[in-house]
């Protein structure tokens, strides 16, 4: 299990295991309170672009992670992103704790509509919204 304290992330966050790409890039962490997903990860040098600020692709991956956790409620339900729209609002630099706040706008039988804001020190750096597909287990 990946421990948030090893990445200087507050201990109330937990790791969602199941996606090796997210673990390799992040790792990312989350907690859920009253239906709102709070996510976090500590920006390291390998997450940055040539301007020494967070690479947009890393921020988009973290936003996608946050939207998917909102869609599956942090449970083991498999989900897949159908679409994700992002607007970059500000930068993040090495050492920043990037925090997400995601919530579901609408939950249907197979699709979930959600939105997330990423911030550093309560300053928004990215707004995103997405459509997430709930995947039903295949019966054999």
Image (spheres, grey):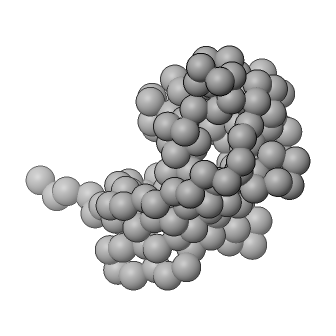
* Image position, residue 69 (x, y; %): 55, 56
Residue 47 in view in this figure: yes
- In this figure, what is the number of numbered marks? 0
Q: Residue at x 67, y 54 (%)?
A: 89
Kindly indicate the quadrant of the structure image that contains residue 132.
bottom left
Q: Is residue 31 left or right of residue 25?
A: right
The residue at 80%/46% (across/down) is 120
Above or below, comparing residue 80 to residue 25 in the picture: below
For the N terminus, the quadrant is: top right
Residue 127 placement (x, y as % from top left):
62, 60
Asked whether residue 72 is in view, the answer is no
Q: Where is residue 78 in the image (x, y as percent from the top left)?
A: 38, 54
**How far across and how far down the image is residue 64, in percent?**
50, 51
Indicate left or right for 131 with 95 as reference: left
Q: Residue at 69%, 22% (x, y): give it.
A: 52
76 relative to 104, above or below = above
Spot the residue most to the left: 140
Q: In this view, does 79 lie above or below 45?
A: below
Viewed as shown, does residue 53 lie left or right of 130?
right
Q: Nearer the viewer, residue 57 or 75?
A: 57
Give the residue displayed 55% in from the left and 39% down from the top: 56
């Amino acid at each position: 299990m990946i421990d948030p304290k090893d990445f200087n992330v507050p201990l109330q966050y937990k790791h969602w295991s199941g996606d090796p790409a997210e673990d390799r890039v992040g790792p990312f962490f989350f907690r859920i309170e009253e239906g709102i997903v709070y996510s976090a990860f500590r920006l390291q040098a390998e997450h940055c672009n040539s301007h020494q600020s967070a690479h947009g692709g890393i921020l988009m991956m973290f936003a996608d992670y946050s939207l998917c956790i909102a869609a599956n409620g942090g449970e083991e339900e498999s989900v897949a992103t159908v679409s994700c729209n992002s607007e970059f609002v500000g930068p993040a630099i090495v050492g920043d704790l990037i925090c997400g706040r995601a919530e579901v706008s609408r939950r249907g039988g197979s699709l979930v509509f959600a939105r997330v804001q990423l911030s550093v020190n309560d300053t928004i750096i990215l707004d995103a919204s997405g459509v997430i597909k709930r995947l039903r287990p295949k019966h054999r």
